[in-house]
Image: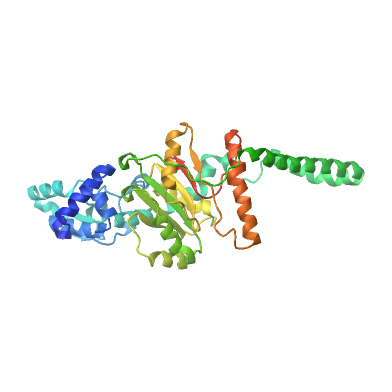
Amino acid sequence: MLDRLGIGPATRDRLRAVALANRTSFRAELLASGLVDDAALTRAMADELGIRAVTEIDPASLVVRDEDCLALLRQRAVSHPAMIAGPDGDTTIAIAPDRPGPAMLARIFRRSPYLTARFRAAAPSRLRTALLRRAAPILSKQAVHGLANAFPHLSARIVANAWQGWVVGVGCVGLPVALVLLPDLTVAVAHALFSFFFLACVSLRFAALKSASPFGLVPLRRVRPADLPAYSVLVALHKEAEIVPDLLAALGRLRWPRSKLEIKLVCEADDVATLAALRAHPMPPCFEIIEVPRDGPRTKPKALSYALPAVSGEYVVLYDAEDRPHPWQLVEAWQAFRTGPPELACVQAPLDIANGRTGPIPLMFAFEYSALFRGLLPFLAGGGLILPLGGTSNHFRGIR
């Protein structure tokens, strides 16, 4: 197969050495190198085994249960055989280059040549695309209703419970009545309460001054590629075609073995401009575009919840389209998890505003974010207090 693809001995030796260093497979490093894509590798396997290759798979023709479909999507590359139903009722088995492997298949076909009519070679990316479309209704239902069904007390579907509604009702009735009957006392009490909360916020920020520190990069320890786990990057985009080139360039600078990295670009299915901008740029195999159906709320949390079941990494990070993460951020986050306590589930990268010196409003914005991420949040985290979690640059582990 490598001869058919034009992969010479020197390249094979180099890829084999990289696979040993990263503790991955030769096939994973071959595809991550960009020398060939999985479609070319699949065609080479089909030619070598004497079977047909399928280029497009109808999602409706896949014979798979819903739970198995979701399990297959959690694989980085769909390598398990898949059964495909034909229009006349017959079935064929689509196989990827990984399992059971070309060498074993060649031995099976030599012993039983009639089996070649039942098998088809299918690229893992084609199988994954078909599985994503097949699972779209399930993923959409989970994204919209999953949290409310599993943990209703954590969901915002119910805006207020009975007790909260009672408090709001009493306040809406009691405050006007108090203003009419005791206006001076009511205003004085309200003024005292509002002043207390305002001064409490100010005092909290003064207390956080002792934790404030200037910007600085944390020195990283030397790492072995073999120790690095699989990492998943989720980026939600909506009507952001203009910044797609900068986003792809920034994500391409992330320092992590490409065979252990997957980047999911999550976009609304009807966001034609952004999807066109993404597809106009050639992307490495670790990139994947996930289209979110138009169902339920059109929000970033829903889009990320839709894509989350389709990730395979041991660690997951969320980015916004305008983010430009430091190339070594994944390594620093991973090392923070390794040195942190077992209950550490999330680390948050500080956000720095790049255009803070371009005008008074960007300067105020940069100052606010600097105070938040360099002073207030470290103070709250150091004291074991509740702290707000931003919507980007958050790294999670143990989500399975």
- The image shows residue 296 at horizontal and vertical percentages of 53, 55
In the figure, residue 40 lies in which quadrant? Answer: bottom left
- The image shows residue 341 at horizontal and vertical percentages of 47, 31
**Along the line of sight, the residue nearer the viewer: 155 or 13:** 13
In the figure, residue 4 lies in which quadrant? Answer: bottom left
Residue 6 visible in this rendered orientation of the protein: yes
Q: Residue drawn at (82%, 40%), measured in percent from left and top? A: 192
**Along the line of sight, the residue nearer the viewer: 36 or 81:** 36
In the figure, residue 221 lies in which quadrant? Answer: top left
Q: Quadrant of the N terminus?
A: bottom left
Q: Residue drawn at (70%, 38%), measured in percent from left and top? A: 163
Give the answer, above or below, for where 381 lies relative to 290.
Answer: above
Relative side of 270 to 361, left or right: left
Relative side of 51 to 274, left or right: left
Relative side of 398 to 114, left or right: right
- The image shows residue 159 at horizontal and vertical percentages of 64, 46
Residue 118 visible in this rendered orientation of the protein: no
